[in-house]
Amino acid sequence: MKPIFEYLDYQLYLKDFYEYKKDQSSYFSYRYMGNKLNLDAGFLVKVLQGKANISNKSIPVIVRFLKLEAREAEYFDLLVRFAKAKTGKECEFLFERIMALRGIDMNRVEDRQYEFYSHWYHNAIRALLSYYSFQGDYKELAKLLSPPITEKQAEDSISLLLSMGFIKRDKLGFFVLTDKTITTGEKWHSPAIHAFQKETISMARESLDRHTKEIRDISSVTISVSHKDLEEIKARASEFRKSLLQMHTGNSPSDIVYQVNIQIVPLTGILGHEEN
């Protein structure tokens, strides 16, 4: 089994640990592991599937069961807190501590993925390069974004995209895409994506003052439904996102990058349900 320092996801680490032990011992089961961790077997399965988080109070018990040494135990504790981080600042603080404890540079794929989603302009530049002919004028590239970024940020972003394999340099010296679509997968609730979404929502709010209505569209609808209808609403939103990714604009070449946010948020509590 890989060392814990190879992981950024404590749930995946626990899942791999369970499968490793299961292969070694036929008696090892969810119930057995749950009893050792003082966790319900059903809840443990949800944790291993990435659908639930353990409480901070469970960390010492799990650390003892995993037989983690001091530095490993601290790393596991950070991973749990990182997975449950609520704010961008908290994500960034914990991520830096995780990297420091590793004692290595950010050169693993998952580390670079976190960096990719840590700032809105990485994704914007990736989309921009689908139609903009760029050979290395970082000052000009930085000015094309709205709002503009610094020349250093533009250069660092190109370096990151190259390291992740999202772009490459062709024979003529132009930076071009290797894959036009990126998805975060099902685990959209990861701290990095949470921070990214907060940043793009904030930029949508700023767009009200930054851009004229001719080049933006910000609309809202307020509806009353049963809370049981949420899954259907999310499914419709998912289909709309997929249709945008598959969208073709005929013979018209691309000339602008848009961020499309679909926000579904409750404005009241559920009638007859007590708030936690």
Image: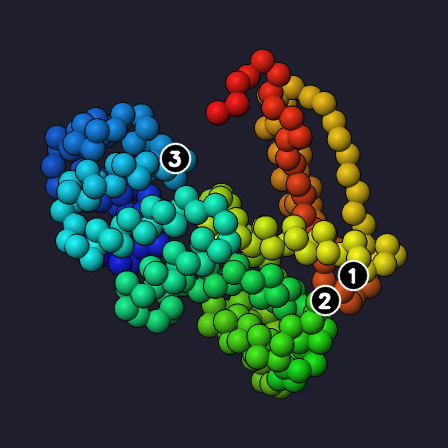
Estimate the x, y position of residue 30 in percent, counting from the top left: 23, 30
Earlier in the chain: of badge 3 and badge 1, it is 3
Of the numbered discs 2 and 3, the one sitting upstream in the chain is: 3
Mark identifier at residue 125: none
Q: Which mark is residue 146?
A: 2
- The kind of secondary structure element at disc 2 is loop
Q: How is the image coloured?
A: rainbow
**In this picture, residue 37 sits left or right of residue 173:** left
209 and 177: which is toward the camera: 209
Q: Residues within 10 Å of mark 1 (few under 14, many from 20)?
A: few
Identify residue type, mark 2.
Answer: Ser
Q: Is residue 37 visible?
A: yes
Left or right of 155 on screen, residue 64: left
Residue tagged by mark 1?
210
Q: Are marks 2 and 1 in contact (CB under 8 Å)?
A: yes
In the drawing, what numbered circle is on residue 52?
A: 3
Residue 92 pos. (x, y %): 45, 58
Q: Residue at x 80, y 57 (%)?
A: 209
Amino acid type for the residue under numbered disc 1: Arg
Q: Quadrant of residue 215?
A: bottom right
- State the SS at label 1: helix
Disc 2 crowd, CA 10 A, few/some/many (<14, 14-19, 20+): some
**Number of numbered discs on residues:** 3
Q: Nearer the viewer, residue 104 or 20?
A: 104
Spatial separation of the CA atoms under disc 2 and disc 3: 37 Å
